[in-house]
Amino acid sequence: MGQRDEKWVRQAQKGSKKAFDKLVRRYAPLIFRLLYDMIRRYEDAQDLTQETFLRAYVNIGQYRGDAKFATWLYRIAYNIGIDFKRRKSKMFNVEFTSQEQKLALQGLDGSKLPGYAGEGEAIESALQKLTHPQRMSVVLNYYHGLRMREIGDILGCSEATVRTHLFRALRRLRRELKDYSPRV
Amino acid sequence: MACKQRENVVSFVLGELSHQNSEPFHEHVKSCPECHQLLQEFQETGKILGIRTMPSAPDGLVGDCLLRIRNAGQDRKASIDERLFLPRLRPGLQWATIVMVFFMGLGLGKLLFQPPVWLERYGRLAQNQVAFLPIDDNRAMRSYLLSVEMLLLDLSNMDDPALLDDDEWNTEIQITREMLKRTRQIKNRLGDGDLRLYQLVAEIEWVLEDVLGTANIDVAGLPPNVRRAIDDQQLLTKIHEYIS
């Protein structure tokens, strides 16, 4: 996956729009989910995803390959999300609208999952109780499969700090979700 | 007291503990109730987190991203087109057109404005010297007289025919012709104005005609004859007096 990314990036840097299109197709859903987790607004996450790829397209020449392309792209998305939150600080931690909640929990149906019941809403609620770096560490690790070093690159902190964030986040989540222990 | 290795539980659960450290830590967990408890909790929490389904990306997300990138690219291209008043050409052709127009402009400018040789050679120097003269008179006239003075000095200083080459002499003759042309223009413009100046310009005209006539008649004896033509009229002295 990484090698194919690098190949497409090199082609995109030489001006191949097709290669960049392939990168967009691969990463757009992931970037959208990351931004959604950051700002909790469906339509804004959509706009910011577009903004992320536009910025990546304009700056693709500056990508030197020091980190994985995915990490570089996530960092752009993360910075855009942070800027958005700063600009619209009132929107931070905004309550879900019923439509957004419905969309956010699309596909989550606790009753269909053996051993668990109603975890969807509880997980969302528990995640919202974490601090921002803790939540982002969990999201990037559990839902984007990034390693602690890569998360540190994105959040702008060390690997040890990310480990601490994860440690505290998991303990907090455990407390919040103690009622949802597997029954099996 | 908290176990010093408890933060390693996270690395262990997330599979980020190196193989070398993994085995010893696994052994440690068996004997450490705190780490054992944490490991169990984190594994269960991980399982619960694993069932969270992420929100689906909107259907047209990829298309929207691609469209926005293309629109941004077109906007940027359009703004360049507007700035340059260029039709929509390929970028390579656009630059080729810009370079071509630039060089055509240079060529045309050179064709339209060919400064006379005398101006190129003497004009700048004359203008510089004018700066040291009192500006109570016509600057253009002073500049002209200084140019004439320098030309005549150059001509009269060509004492040794052996030191002259054909190109150098031909250039001097060409300059003299141009200066004669300009002198006639100035004389015609002076009309009923300053009589003293008119006489001076008429003498310059006469001397320049003589220089050119001499040049046409006797190529071998050019420098002495030219000098004589200038000296006979004491023109340099008269010009110098007028300027002073």
Image (cartoon, rainbow, N blue to C red):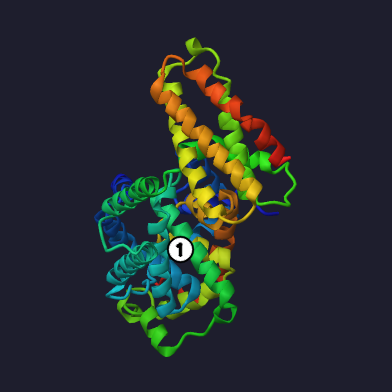
**Residue at 38% of width from left, 47% of height from top?**
B106
Chain letter behind tag 1:
A
| Residue B188 in the image, given as x and y percentages of width and height | 51, 52
A22 or B121, nearer to the observer: B121
Q: In the picture provided, is A109 more to the left or to the right than B8?
A: left
| Residue A136 in the image, given as x and y percentages of width and height | 51, 64
Residue topped by disc 1: A77
B170 or B47, nearer to the observer: B170
**Residue at 47% of width from left, 47% of height from top?**
B16
Can residue B233 be seen from the camera position used here?
yes
Query: What amino acid type is highlighted by mark number 1?
Result: Ala
Q: In the picture provided, is A105 more to the left or to the right than B205?
A: left
Q: In the picture provided, is B2 more to the left or to the right than B81?
A: right
Q: In the picture provided, is A109 more to the left or to the right than B142?
A: left
The answer to whether residue B46 is above or below residue A178 is above
How many numbered circles are shown? 1
| Residue B167 in the image, given as x and y percentages of width and height | 41, 22
B221 or A136, nearer to the observer: B221
- The residue tagged with tag 1: helix, strand or loop? helix
Can residue A177 be seen from the camera position used here?
no
| Residue B49 in the image, given as x and y percentages of width and height | 43, 67
Query: Which image quadrant: the N terminus of chain B?
Result: bottom right
Q: Callout 1: few (<14), some (14-19), or many (20+) C-alpha neighbours within 10 Å?
A: many
Q: Residue furthest bottom?
A: A98
**Residue at 56% of width from left, 47% of height from top?**
B31
Query: Which image quadrant: the C terminus of chain B?
Result: top right
